[in-house]
Image (cartoon, coloured by chain):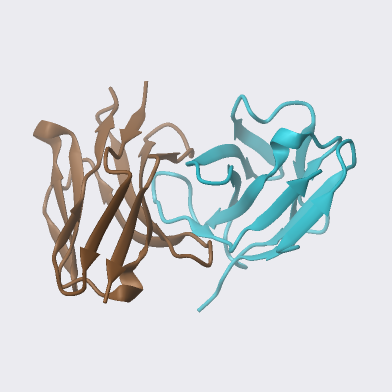
Chain colours: A brown, B cyan
Amino acid sequence: AQKVTQAQTEISVVEKEDVTLDCVYETRDTTYYLFWYKQPPSGELVFLIRRNSFDEQNEISGRYSWNFQKSTSSFNFTITASQVVDSAVYFCALMTYNTDKLIFGTGTRLQVFP
Amino acid sequence: EPEVTQTPSHQVTQMGQEVILRCVPISNHLYFYWYRQILGQKVEFLVSFYNNEISEKSEIFDDQFSVERPDGSNFTLKIRSTKLEDSAMYFCATQRGGGRTGELFFGEGSRLTVL
């Protein structure tokens, strides 16, 4: 069975702190895709990144970086020098090769205080 | 930047009433999806739609739900007889290629409140 676990329900930080959001996934498929989405208070889902299971290279995009480790089935997301605008719920999601269905984790609510 | 548009943004209805939620996909996208999010909970897959037919659906998507592209542009989700537990945010998502190619673009959601 496929499953995504985001153990951190809520994280609070002060602006300029670094913060890492954890994501652990389960699947028996060898080909799969991992995603992160941001849901700001306005409610929409904003795509952040997609990674396929054959590409373990870490990625950096501005203040965002992602650490994909197949050995621990984790796909963690780090925000460097957090800002108030980063406050949102962040969802990790999994899609396996033979389906179009995204399986979401329960989300981590990040609050960044000034 | 092209975007997925959903209407209405919020609908309040009485239990037992029919509801239609509408989505205008990005124009060159071929795959369409509905997801829902009960308040404070995770986002759940409902259905995927390609080439004018359902390609996959979840156990949530029972006989009370249906989807269609009536005019080649809009993509609709119909709930025939709403229940209290249908209250949720419903997200439409579209994708140019299939799941293996990846990025789903989500609309801003339609909040459904069933009284």
Residue A66 appears left or right of B6: left
Q: Quadrant of the N terminus of chain A?
A: top left
- Where residue B49 appears, x then y in whole percent? 64, 43
Q: Nearer the viewer, residue B56 or A20?
A: A20
Q: Quadrant of the C terminus of chain A?
A: bottom left
Residue B95 appears left or right of B80: left
Could you tell me how many numbered marks the image carries? Answer: 0
- Where residue A113 appears, x then y in whole percent? 28, 71
Q: Is residue A80 above or below residue A96?
A: below
Q: Is residue B78 above or below residue A99?
A: below
Using the rendered view, name the quadrant where residue B17 is placed: top right
Whether residue A66 appears in this view of the structure is yes
Q: Is residue A112 above or below residue B113?
A: below
Residue at 76% x, 53% y: name it.
B21
Using the rendered view, name the quadrant where residue A62 is placed: bottom left
Residue at 78% x, 56% y: name it.
B11
Residue B68 appears left or right of B36: right
- Where residue B6 appears, x then y in whole percent? 68, 63
Whether residue B74 appears in this view of the structure is no
Residue at 19% x, 48% y: name it.
A76
Q: Is residue A23 above or below residue B30?
A: above
Using the rendered view, name the quadrant where residue B16 is placed: top right
Residue at 80% x, 31% y: name it.
B64
Q: Nearer the viewer, residue B51 or B21?
A: B21
- Where residue A57 appears, x then y in whole percent? 11, 53
